Image (cartoon, grey):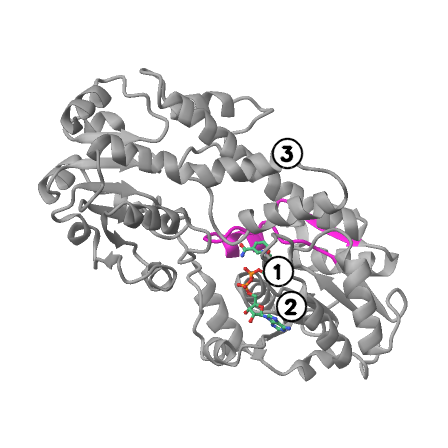
């Protein structure tokens, strides 16, 4: 399998698809990326990455320039592909179940364009889909549209993606594992060979399993990570009420236990992003249809939904009534290094604050254009953090951007009308903020701040 002779098709150029395409192209594999959105295709073709993702633009331009990457809206380009990835979106329907329309359309379009193809080709479902989708939904559509049999002339497998937005390129080059769910040995052999060729001596462990198990691994993974976050947020909400207790120290201590591990134990305003909520809702609906009520997953979601209220509680402790108060939100993206505001807690917090009569001014280094679309124009946007803080009654830090770390207690007290700060991301060392009114998620106010604060607001 020589890179120059192995052709890859990637259908759907969102986060996952574009990242997959530029990564393969960067190692010389002839890659064609296809999307139905013409404008997006034109923009990517011109070398512009439609999302903010570190290192993505360099790889894109390099791929286009070297000719190893081609971007188009013409599915006919797939007729020469040896391996075709499906990376389209799988959004939630209103009942929480997943909408497979894009996956089904993509499967049909891929099938039609493989009709005339000679030789073996493997179709890989990388989108997150509920167990059974690859075998019972994608397979018949591909067979019908292509007039060819999966298992003989075509291969099919589920190969979920685990990248994280913000570190997507790094994650694509350094995955912890590769999960390949295939019913036929040829497809498994093909994909294993391909990945060994791509990753060489750095090939991670490969989990070879059934398509259904592969699909379920992705849901189990996101379900577990989200549960870990809701768990530590629950501990934080309890800790907040006990003078002398700090959730950060608790997380550090329990994280040293190898059975627990240190990651995803950062208390905060709740998880966001395009995947956790969507995937947990998808899992809940899927599980219910099977006759099992997944109480733990439901509760993880409930805790997360409630977490915005915990942030508001801290604001209210500092301010009392929010009516006509000017409140600054620092950070709008669901985490740093991305401009993604899908399911971001900032949107929920801004809406709650507005409902309670507050005036909201927000700043984010890159997510403001997306946030503008998600919020109505009653939220003001500032050009930099200092402008956002001017004349403010309270500031809430909602995203862990590095530039916010550089702000000091002096900056806050100099710029704000009243220096009230809620650190919902635990960016700051509480000891450095003794001079201003400071509350943080999961920090029992042992230094008398809470008492002082209550005196202020009463
Ligand atoms: P996205 O919404 O950013 O992009 C999907 C793209 O698919 C869009 O550009 C859309 O125009 C295109 N598309 C839709 N129908 C198409 C069709 N028939 N043919 C060609 N293109 C089509 O989605 P995403 O965030 O990249 O996620 C893709 C999948 O990967 C989802 O199932 C998601 O759950 C999963 N996933 C996402 C992430 C993440 O961090 N974003 C991580 C792991 C897994």
> How far apart in space, not on screen, are marks 1 and 2 (Cα)?
7 Å
Asked if the residue under mark 2 is in contact with the one under mark 1, i.e. CB atoms within 8 Å, the reply is: yes
- x%, y% of residue 127? 65, 59
Pick whichever, 126 or 5, lies toward us.
126
Residue 255 located left or right of residue 344: right
Count of numbered marks:
3
Look at mark 1 in the image and give the residue it sits on.
90
Q: Is residue 15 visible?
A: yes
Residue 258, horizontal then vertical, whole percent = 58, 24
x 57%, y 61%: residue: 16
- In the drawing, what numbered circle is on residue 102? 2
Q: Say if the magenta span includes residue 159.
A: yes
Q: Earlier in the sequence, mark 1 or mark 3?
A: 1
Range of residues picked out in magenta = 158-181
Rendered-image quarter of ligand 1: bottom right
Residue 125: x and y, percent? 71, 61
Secondary structure found at label 1? loop
**Which secondary structure, mark 3?**
helix
Identify residue for label 3.
Answer: 295
Q: Is mark 2 within 8 Å of ligand 1?
A: yes
């Amino acid at each position: 399998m020589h890179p120059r002779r192995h052709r890859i098709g990637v259908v759907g150029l969102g986060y996952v698809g574009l990242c997959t395409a530029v990564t393969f192209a960067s190692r010389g594999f002839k890659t064609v990326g296809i999307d139905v959105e013409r404008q997006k295709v034109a923009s990517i073709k011109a070398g512009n990455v439609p999302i903010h993702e570190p290192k993505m633009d360099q790889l894109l331009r390099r791929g286009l320039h070297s000719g190893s990457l081609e971007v188009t809206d013409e599915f006919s380009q797939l007729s020469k592909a040896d391996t075709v990835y499906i990376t389209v979106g799988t959004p939630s329907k209103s009942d929480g179940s997943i909408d497979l329309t894009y996956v089904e359309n993509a499967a049909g379009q891929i099938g039609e364009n493989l009709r005339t193809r000679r030789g073996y080709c493997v179709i890989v479902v990388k989108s997150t889909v509920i167990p059974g989708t690859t075998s019972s939904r994608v397979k018949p559509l591909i067979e019908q549209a292509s007039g060819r049999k999966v298992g003989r002339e075509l291969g099919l497998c589920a190969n979920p993606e685990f990248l994280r937005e913000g570190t997507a390129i790094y994650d694509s080059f350094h995955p912890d594992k590769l999960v390949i769910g295939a019913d036929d040995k040829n497809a498994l052999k093909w994909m294993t060979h391909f990945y060994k060729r791509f990753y060489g001596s750095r090939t991670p462990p490969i989990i070879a399993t059934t398509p259904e198990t592969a699909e379920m691994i992705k849901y189990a993974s996101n379900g577990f990570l989200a549960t870990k976050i809701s768990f530590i947020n629950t501990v934080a909400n309890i800790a907040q009420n006990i003078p002398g207790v700090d959730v950060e120290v608790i997380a550090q201590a329990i994280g040293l236990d190898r059975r627990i591990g240190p990651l995803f134990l950062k208390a905060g305003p709740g998880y966001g992003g395009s995947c956790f909520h969507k995937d947990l809702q998808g899992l809940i609906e899927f599980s219910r249809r099977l006759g099992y009520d997944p109480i733990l997953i439901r509760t993880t979601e409930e805790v997360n939904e409630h977490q915005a209220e915990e942030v508001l509680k801290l604001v209210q402790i500092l301010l009392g009534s929010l009516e006509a108060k000017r409140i600054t939100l620092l950070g709008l993206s669901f985490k740093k290094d991305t401009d993604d505001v899908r399911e971001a807690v900032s949107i929920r917090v801004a809406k709650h604050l507005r409902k309670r009569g507050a005036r909201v001014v927000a700043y984010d280094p890159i997510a403001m254009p997306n946030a503008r679309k998600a919020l109505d124009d009653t939220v003001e946007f500032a050009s930099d953090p200092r402008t956002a803080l001017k004349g403010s009654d309270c500031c809430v830090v909602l995203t862990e951007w590095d530039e916010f770390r550089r702000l000091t207690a002096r900056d806050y007290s100099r710029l704000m009308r009243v220096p009230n700060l809620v650190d919902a991301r635990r960016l700051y060392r509480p000891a450095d903020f003794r001079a201003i009114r400071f509350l943080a998620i999961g920090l029992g106010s042992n230094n008398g701040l809470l008492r002082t604060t209550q005196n202020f607001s009463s």
